[in-house]
Amino acid sequence: MAVSGTAEVNARVVTALKRCGVDLAAFAGDGLTARTPVTGAALFDLRAHGPEEVDEVVDAAHRAFLAWRTVPAPVRGLLVKRFGALLTEHRADLAALVTAEAGKIESESLGEVQEMVDVCDFAVGLSRQLYGRTMPSERPEHRLMETWHPLGVVGVISAFNFPVAVWAWNAAVALVCGDTVVWKPSELTPLTALACAALLDRAAAECGAPPRLNQVLLGGADTGARLVDSPLVPLVSATGSTRMGREVGPQVAARFGRSLLELGGNNAVVVAPSADLDLVVNAAVFAAAGTAGQRCTSLRRVIAHEDVVDEVADRLAAAFRTLPVGDPFQDGTLVGPLVRGAAHDAMRAAAERAVARGGVVLAGGGRELVDAAPEAYYIRPAVLRMPEQSAVVLEETFAPLLYVLSYQDFAEAVALQNGVPHGLSAGVFTRDQAEAERFLAADGADCGIVNVNIGTSGAEIGGAFGGEKETGGGRESGSDAWRAYMRRATNTVNFSGRVALAQGVDFSR
Ligand code: UN1
């Protein structure tokens, strides 16, 4: 099978960027090389922002915030509405950039753009629903209420695997909340970021919004670290590895900032004996091999009842053996390349450790298309049968590597599911309603996302997204996640003409 040539990918990228309004020449320079995992080759050399430039960008964002915060929220919503329309118009361009830089297949890239459009719709509605509560005051002729105000500059650090949707979850909500955004995208996906930012700038200009509501910082970890340390950034929303979160969280906390962390996952599904196994296999194949296993929600563990585990493992292995692995630009491909060689190294090392602990490789794990694309990393997703949940299974390996474990009773399955450091996403496949409820209950799965008869990945934007334990505890996107992007003021208003102290305190003179 052939793979698109670098020149071809390059041409698609140039066209898409131009259509989105990016003047690539303005970003040319040193410090950051945009690459494509489709061929593994370099595309463009970009000028990276050094850490010393961060302060100027943050200052500008703060000045923009001072103007933006007094614009009525429903008017702020109009900007996000226009932005959503531009994203829809440039769906194909943005998806091409996502495929070129992150290696996702077309359908998943379009899905990611759709996720941006969806969250814009959500945020537009939200712009009329930033509700505070009123509470009965214990004092006569007093009113007690809360008001939600804009917070300030939100620093967004995003990962390569969702190069635009996760930024949009943050940016669309932050903008209607009256905040401004400084975005440090992954070094692996700078071009998609520039395209989104150009479209947002265009929407802002058309709506008469202040300039620099959203700015992109291209650069490495030192640039990100400066953003994280900026006192004018009250909220840092960071998506990435648990290792990254372990640095960002304490750094932000040290200056009493807020952080919203969306870190790793080691997601599992429990397959009960009553489960519909067709459903299990179809759901698990997408969850484990979709996005080449590079979602934080990717399925990493199948915990199947001993009566069905052999059949589940065999059927998964058979499915993995025939998955179309290849050029993500080509119709019919379901598994694109890994983003870089390091992901392949990590996958191989994990598989070796698993085998050393009694694991059996049932399918996959090998490199493909080496002749067609020697610098790219096309890997056949792997299924391993494990005798127990050994140390390597407890770790997140960011690659299409699926471990199959067995259980005897349901409590054991829940304990295995919960027995990892992360707490992002879990699912149970069962036709037994009581079992499903037990999985969802307080002593059931300990994750931020818990599903029944659905895999671990592919959440809708309407819910709050995030997880517990080493996943970091943050919640983004839908439901009431917006509250993290605002400050709450509790207001007590006295219209009695007298001083009345709470708790019945008497201080009369
Ligand atoms: C991520 O991998 O960082 O639920 C986000 C999902 C997507 C988002 C994943 N909607 O898989």
Image (cartoon, grey):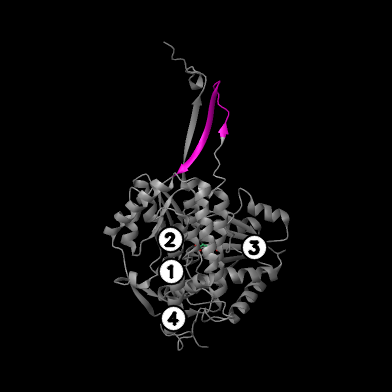
Q: Position of residue 232 (x, y in %)?
A: 34, 48
Q: Amino acid at mark 3?
A: Ile
Residue designated by label 4: 11
Please identify the quarter of the rendering in which residue 360 is found: bottom right
The residue indicated by pointer 1 is 21
Q: Which residues are magenta?
A: 134-150
Mark 3–mark 1 distance (CA, rounded to whole Å): 39 Å
Q: Residue at x 32, y 51 (%)?
A: 59
Real-space CA distance between mark 3 and mark 4, rounded to the nearest whole angstrom: 38 Å
Q: Nearer the viewer, mark 4 or mark 1?
A: 1
Kindly give the residue lying farthest to the left in the view shown: 52
Q: Earlier in the sequence, mark 2 or mark 3?
A: 2
> Contact, CB < 8 Å: mark 3 with mark 1?
no
Labels 2 and 3 touching (C-beta < 8 A): no
Compared with residue 203, is residue 3 higher up or lower down, i.e. above or below? below
- Above or below: residue 14 compared with residue 296: below
Q: Residue at x 61, y 48 (%)?
A: 442
Q: Secondary structure at mark 1?
A: loop
Say which residue label 2 marks: 201
* Mark in the foreground, 3 or 4: 4
User: Which label is found at residue 454?
Assistant: 3
Left or right relative to 323: residue 161: left
* Residue at point 31%, 61% (across, down): 222
Asked if the residues shown at circle 2 and circle 1 are in contact, with their CB atoms under 8 angstroms apart, the answer is yes
Which quadrant is the C terminus positioned in?
top left
Q: Is residue 264 visible?
A: no
Residue 147 counted in the magenta span: yes
Viewer-closest of 159 and 232: 232
Q: Position of residue 205 (x, y in %)?
A: 44, 58
Q: Residues within 10 Å of mark 2 (few under 14, many from 20)?
A: many
Q: Is residue 78 visible?
A: yes
